[in-house]
Image: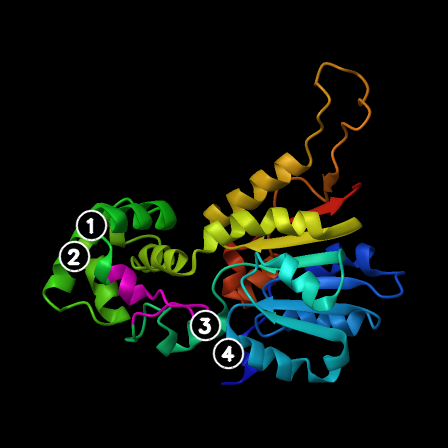
Amino acid sequence: MSADLAHIPVALDQCVDLLSPALVNKSKPYLIDATLGLAGHAKVILERFPNLHLIGIDRDQAAIKIAQSNLAQYADRITIVHATFDQIDLALSAAAVEKVDGILFDLGVSSMQLDQAERGFSYSQAAPLDMRMDQSASLTAAAVLNTYSHGALAKIIQNYGEEKFASKIAENIVKARSAGELNTTKDLAQIVKDSIPAPARRTGGNPAKRTFQAIRIEVNQELATLERAIPAALAALAIGGRLVVMSYQSLEDRIVKNFFTQATKSMTPLALPVELPNSAASYRLLFNGSAVADAKEQESNPRSQSMRLRAIERLSA
C-alpha cells in the first residue's frame, strides 16, 4: 500500500496557520505531533520551519515505521515515541525538553487503519475482530464482544456509539456468540443490521458505523486517554505555545471543548469590573467554537466532513 495514497492530511493549511505564530522567529521551536500517523501534517511542518524539532507520538507501530520512512530526510530533527497520546511527559523526556511551542492532535482512526482490512476497523469487509490501534496491546474487539455481559455491551454501544438500539444489538451479539456465529467484522455488521428496524436503517449511512465506533473506542480506551491527554498537553505548552485539536465525533469534541472552556475561564467574579490579581485565565481560545474543513476539502476528502477543529494558546504560567 502506498503511504501517499493512505492518508490525506485533514485541514492541513488551517493547522499550519494556527500553529505558525508559536513557531516562527524561534531559534529551535519544538512541536509535538501527538497522533503522528503517516506523518502527513508533520512532514509539511518540518518543511515549513527548518529549525523546528518534531516530537512524534503514535501507538501504532506499523504507522511509525511508515512515518519514519516518510520523514527520513529529517531524521536529525525528529524524536518518535511509541506511546498513547496522553503520554506527553514521556515524549518530553525522550526529547529532553520541558515545554514545547506547539502540539497537534488528529484524533480517531487513521485512513491506514481503515484501509487495512485485516486490522478489523472496517465494517465493509470480512476481517478478524481486532480493532487495536496498538497491535501489541492485549484487548481486542473479539475479547470485548465475546466476554462482556449484555449490560456492559449495551452501555458501551449506547454511550460510545450514541446508538438508540444498543440493547437489542447487545442482545443479538450475545446470542450470536453463543451459537458460534460471531467470528468476523462482517458477522458483527450483519448482527447490527438485523437488530435495527428497516425504517431506521434508511438514513445515516451504514447502520454498523455507530457500533463499530463504540467497540473501537472501548478496545483502545480512546475517550479515557483523551481525558488525560488534553490537560497534559495544556501543561506542556510554553507561554505563547499553541494546541490544535481535530475531532471526528461529538464525544471527542465535547471533551476538548470542556477542557478548553475551563482553561480559558477567569477566576474573577463576573460582577467585578476589573480582573483581580492572579485571577486571569492562563489560556485563550484562538477562535470561538469549532472550525470545519472548507467546502472544497470536504468534497475531495470525505474524512474531513465530520472534523471539528479547536485551538488554544497559553498566555501565562
Closer to us: 199 or 140: 140
Give percent across and percent down for residue 305.
52, 57
Residue indicated by mark 4: 62
- Main SS type for the magenta part? loop
Tell me, yes or no, whether the two marked residues, 2 and 1, touch with CB atoms within 8 Å: yes
Please tell me which of labels 3 and 2 falls first in the chain. Answer: 3
Question: At 72% across and 81% down in the image, what residue appears?
Answer: 75
Marks 3 and 4: in contact by CB < 8 Å?
no
Q: Quadrant of the C terminus?
A: top right
Amino acid under disc 4: Ala
Residue pointed to by mark 2: 174
Q: Which mark sits nearer the N-terminus, 4 or 2?
A: 4
Q: Look at the image and give the residue range highlighted in magenta.
A: 129-145
Name the kind of residue labelled 2 in the image.
Val
Provide the secondary structure element on which disc 2 rests. Answer: helix
> Is 286 rendered above or below residue 148?
above
Identify the image quadrant of residue 73. Answer: bottom right
